[in-house]
Image (cartoon, grey):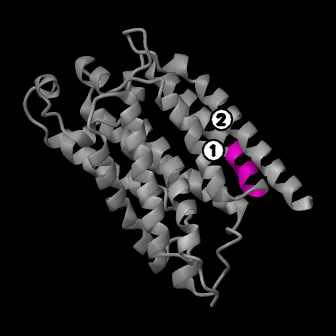
Amino acid sequence: TAVMDTSTRRVIVLCISIALAAVVFAGVEPMLESVRGIPGPTIADSSRPFLAIIAVLAAFAATTAVAVVIARKVNSVVALFALGCGGGMLAMRTGAVRDLVFGESSLKLAAVECFVWTALLAAACHVIFRFGGRLPDIPETHEDDIDSPVGRSARRSWLAGIVGVLAAWFAVATLTKGQAVGAAVLGGFVSGAFGRILAPRTTPVYLAVAPMAVFAIAYAFMAFTVQGDIATDLVQGGFPRRLRSMPLDMAAGALAGTSLGFGFVRSFTEPKTA
C-alpha cells in the first residue's frame, strides 16, 4: 500500500543517513590520535589539535546537512537521532576516562569542550528544525508561549535536562567507554521523556541542548574545583561519576537519547489542539 511504501522509504532514508553519518565521523578518527597513538578522549588531546578541530567541525556540519535531509523526508526528531548515532559511533572509538586521567589530559580543557559541544548542538538543532519544520503531531496553537522554541513552555521543558543528567550520573557506575556512552543516552532519554511531559504542545527545538548544557555546567564546576591526585582517586573509586563521561559521549547521548525519549512518550501525552 501507499502507506507501507512511504514508511519503507522513510526507514531506508534513515538507515542510509545513519550509515553516512557514521562514515563521515569515522573519517575524523585519525585526526583525533593523541601522542599515545590512539584517539584521545577529547579533541584537545589530539597531537594535531588545530586539524582535529577543523575536521570535527567539518564532519559535524556535513552530518547536520544529512540530518536536514532526514528532517524533510521524515521529521526533525528522527534527524536528531541520526546525528546522535553518528556522533555516538565516533565517541565509542575515542578514549575513556582512564585515558583522560592517566594520559594527563586537562579537565579544564575538557570542560571548555563541553560548552563548545553545547553551542554546536544548539546550532544543529536550530538548522534542523528550521528546514525540517514543525512535527506533524504537534499542531501550531498560535500562542507565543507555547509555539515559540524559547517561550515559557519550552523553557519549562528544559528543566528536564537536570533530571536527565542525574539519571546519567546514577547510570555511569564503571569506567568503561560503553557505559559512559550508554549513561549519556539514558540521560538524554530521560530528558526527552520528561521534556515532552512538561511541554507536550511545544516543538522541542532546543530540548536536546538542555542535558548537554546542564552536563557542561556540572562538569565545569567539578573540573575547576576537584582537588588531590585524580589518578589515585580513580584507582580507589573516588573519582567523580559525572566526570566519567567525555564531552562527545554526552553530546551524542543528548541528541540520540532525547529523540528516543521524546518519541517514546508520544502515546502518553497526545497534544490537544487549541
**Residue drawn at 45 percent across, 46 percent down:** 185
**Residue drawn at 66 percent across, 81 percent down:** 140
Tell me if label 1 and label 2 are in contact, CB under 8 Å.
Answer: yes
Residue 32 shows up from this direction: yes
Q: Is residue 194 found inside the magenta-colored segment of the image?
A: no
Task: Out of 14 and 72, give the one closest to the viewer.
Answer: 14
Residue 203 shows up from this direction: no
Image quarter in which the C terminus is found: bottom right
**Residue drawn at 88 percent across, 53 percent down:** 5
Residue 102: percent from left, percent from top:
24, 18
Q: Which residues are magenta?
A: 65-72
Counting residues from the start of the chain, the first of labels 1 and 2 encountered is 2
> In the rendered view, would you say 228 is above or below 263?
above
Residue 111: percent from left, percent from top:
31, 40
**Residue drawn at 46 percent across, 73 percent down:** 197
Residue 153: percent from left, percent from top:
47, 78
In the rendered structure, the answer to whether residue 212 lies left or right of residue 221 reads: right
Instruction: Give the overall secondary structure of the magenta segment.
Output: helix
Q: Amino acid at mark 2?
A: Ala
Quickly name the residue at label 1. 82
Quickly name the residue at label 2. 21
